[in-house]
């Protein structure tokens, strides 16, 4: 029997069905490319996900791959969003036995929790900074500084990845314009540069779709007000209002030049009718995917303290057992 089909068989409870499910899903997603998307997505849909625990595990893995993969989350977010759309209405019985829980509900809760957890992350970073200042030896300071840098980098990566993923979900009409309105407003109110950077990435992703959705809702609201003979009411903010505020910020000397240029790039994109001057990165074909897998292995071995050398995209491990250049089995 095909190995891929074997992974879709009924799970053995004694061997831990959720653990087996997680391994199978991760294995599929690690091989995901534009070329095999239909096959991989069909295989994941055929997996037996019939409990809230399994559905939560499925949401967690897809979300983590879309948001926190250091190699390619920013490139593959659109594909993961497409995968979520296939399962968006999937429902299973709730663990409490009352009603059902949906993939949609779990995914939106995860996106919201990640978007709103910045306060907790900031508190953890401040705590690490305080511990660094109080360290009494150089060795301890060096260790704490590395932990602090890793934490800051991970927080920034997750925040940026979540914003991109939210934008891709909105473009596929899985999130409402009301949610986008809230996200843009919250990011714009902050004068923190990381928040403003996320704002720019979000509008880069959703700008055209937001305007289309707003115009459609505005036209419906006008027609409804005429039919009922009532005053026009619409509780959304036009994107131009946010862009005017961003234009003011782009001239502020309190911000770094990098952020000011990012803000100006968004304004230029709007001026160009949301057509980018250069095409962004797209999901890789199979050969390029091999290079990404090798790059991931390089970062994993380097983080584990294993001595590695990197030649271009390929890596070699300095061991007598494995001298070949990053073997890959298709």
Image (cartoon, rainbow, N blue to C red):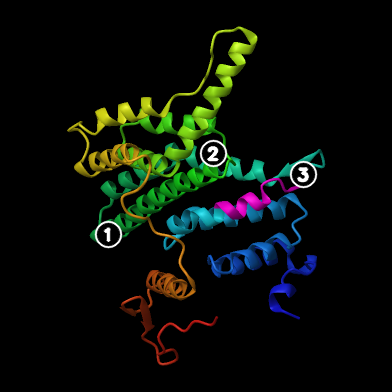
Helix, strand or loop at mark 3? loop
Q: x%, y% of residue 203?
A: 40, 39
Apparent side of residue 25 relative to residue 238 in the rendered image (left or right): right
Whether 220 is drawn above or below 107: the answer is above
Q: Is residue 48 left or right of residue 117?
A: right
How far apart are the two marked residues, 2 and 3, measured between alpha carbons?
Answer: 20 Å
Tag 3 or tag 2, which sits nearer the N-term? 3
| Label 3 Cα neighbours within 10 Å, binned few <14 / some 14-19 / many ≥20 | some
- Residue at 71 percent of width and 71 percent of height: 7
Mark positioned earlier in the residue sequence (2 or 1): 2
Q: Which residue is tagged 1?
A: 142
Corner quadrant of residue 98: top right
Of badges 3 and 1, the one in the foreground is 3
C-alpha separation, residue under disc 2 versus residue under disc 1: 35 Å
Residue furthest out toward the bottom: 320
Q: Which x, y percent locates residue 306?
A: 38, 77
Residue 225 place in picture, x, y as percent: 59, 13
The range drawn in magenta is: 81-94
Q: Are marks 3 and 1 in contact (CB under 8 Å)?
A: no
Residue under numbered circle 3: 94
The residue nearer to you, when weighing 10 against 259, is: 259
Identify the element where label 2 is drawn: helix
């Amino acid at each position: 029997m095909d190995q891929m089909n074997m992974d879709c068989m009924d799970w053995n409870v004694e061997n831990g069905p959720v653990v087996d499910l997680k391994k199978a899903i991760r294995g599929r997603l690690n091989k995901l490319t534009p070329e095999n998307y239909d096959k991989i997505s069909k295989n994941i849909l055929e997996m037996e996900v019939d409990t809230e625990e399994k559905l939560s595990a499925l949401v967690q893995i897809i979300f983590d791959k879309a948001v926190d993969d250091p190699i390619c989350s920013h490139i593959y977010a659109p594909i993961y969003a497409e995968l979520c759309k296939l399962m968006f209405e999937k429902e299973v019985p709730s663990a409490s036995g009352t009603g059902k829980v949906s993939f949609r509900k779990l995914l939106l809760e995860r996106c919201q929790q990640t978007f709103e957890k910045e306060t907790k992350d900031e508190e953890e970073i401040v705590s690490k900074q305080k511990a660094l200042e109080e360290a009494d030896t150089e060795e301890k300071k060096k260790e704490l500084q590395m932990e602090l840098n890793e934490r800051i980098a991970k927080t920034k990566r997750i925040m940026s990845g979540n914003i991109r993923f939210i934008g891709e979900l909105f473009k596929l009409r899985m999130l409402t314009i009301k949610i986008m309105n809230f996200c843009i407003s919250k990011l714009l109110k902050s004068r923190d540069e990381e928040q403003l950077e996320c704002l720019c990435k979000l509008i880069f992703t959703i700008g055209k779709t937001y305007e289309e959705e707003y115009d459609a809702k505005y036209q419906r609201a006008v027609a409804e007000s005429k039919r009922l003979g009532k005053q026009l009411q619409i509780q959304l903010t036009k994107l131009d209002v946010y862009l005017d505020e961003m234009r003011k910020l782009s001239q502020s000397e309190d911000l770094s030049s990098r952020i000011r240029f990012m803000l100006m790039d968004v304004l230029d994109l709007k001026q160009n009718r949301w057509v980018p001057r250069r095409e962004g990165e797209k999901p890789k074909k199979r050969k390029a995917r091999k290079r990404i897998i090798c790059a991931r292995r390089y970062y994993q071995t380097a983080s584990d303290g294993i001595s590695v050398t990197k030649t271009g995209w390929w890596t070699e491990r300095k061991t007598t057992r494995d001298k070949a250049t990053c073997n890959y089995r298709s």
